[in-house]
Image (cartoon, rainbow, N blue to C red):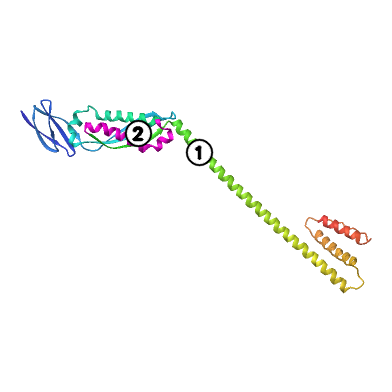
Amino acid sequence: MCLVCVTISTAEVGIIEKFGKYSRNAQPGCNFYCAPMEQLVGRLSFRVQQLDVRVETKTLDNVFVTAVVSVQYQILREKVYDAFYALTNPTQQITAHIYDVMRSQLPTLELDAVFEAKEELALAVKNALSATMTGYGYQILQALITDLEPDQRVKNAMNEINSSKRLKFAVAERAEGDKILMVKSAEAEAEAKYLSGVGVAKQRKAIVDGLKTSIVDFSEGVHNTSSKDVMDLLLLTQYFDCLKDVGGASNCKTTFVPSSRSGSDDMRNALLQANAAK
């Protein structure tokens, strides 16, 4: 026989067998066993471990989705024997349960609902694994859905839909802005025309009032004059003012002035012609 010294690291445990049968656990530190009767057949770590599993399945609306499930687990100290001897490959066991849960849950949900139900899916995976793996000496600490990736063509289609919705919203907002602009412009134009009309009306009223005052003053100041004489004088004055304005315009080259002296009617017609030319 030979006494063999072996060291076990912190957060680990060694499994020692005697003549092929489980004998005891080797705790962290320096341990001795008698060879060849006893052997250190394995080590287990109490550290938290993580297993990432990619699962491809389809949703209720027949869209294939690849989900990445991350499971964090740890060996229970009081069940080291079960953790070492009960399962040949614990990661395969965990992977099989993840496949089973995800491929039974995802086909009941549509694609949009899958992204909203990540927490529920992760909880279902954790509960299913805990119910099974605890009996084998493994504690399931956490199950996370870290990624959900639809088929690339589906992703492109979803991006196109979102882009179209945003474009439609932008066009509607732009049209609403143009509408407000046109309404405000029309309101401003109406207000301007109203104010212009008010100004013209006041101007004409002032002219009429001025003519009235001029006629009254002239009639009172000059005796033996009739209203027709006063009107002819006023028309003559406006006639010459009109000719002055027309002749002084920058685009006026020639001004035709009637030479008839037949009376106020011809002058009135000349005044109308001058106003039309202006």
The main secondary structure of the magenta stretch is: helix
Name the residue at 80% across, 64% down: 208
Helix, strand or loop at mark 2: strand
Residue, far right: 262
Q: The disc labelled 2 sits on which kind of residue?
A: Val
Please state if 101 lies on the left or on the right of 171 as rendered: left
Q: Nearer the viewer, residue 151 or 251?
A: 151
Choose the circle earlier in sequence order: 2 or 1.
2
Please state if 213 lies on the left or on the right of 183 as rendered: right
Residue 147 in picture, x, y percent from top left? 37, 36
Q: The disc labelled 1 sits on which kind of residue?
A: Ser
Helix, strand or loop at mark 1: helix
Whether 164 is drawn above or below 35: the answer is: below
Residue 34 in picture, x, y percent from top left? 7, 30
Residue, far left: 1
Say which mark, if any, is on residue 46. none
Say which mark, if any, is on residue 68. 2
**Magenta stretch contains residue 115:** yes
User: Considering the image in quadrants, where does the C terminus appear?
Assistant: bottom right
Residue 206 location, quadrant: bottom right
Residue to which mark 1 is pinned:
163
User: Considering the image in quadrants, where does the N terminus appear?
Assistant: top left
Q: How many circles with numbers are drawn on the protein?
A: 2
Q: Which segment did they paint magenta?
A: 108-137
Please state if 239 lies on the left or on the right of 188 as rendered: right
Q: Residues within 10 Å of mark 2 (few under 14, many from 20)?
A: some
Q: In whole angstroms, how far apart are the C-alphas of marks 2 and 1?
A: 27 Å
Residue 133 location, quadrant: top left
Residue 86 in picture, x, y percent from top left? 20, 28
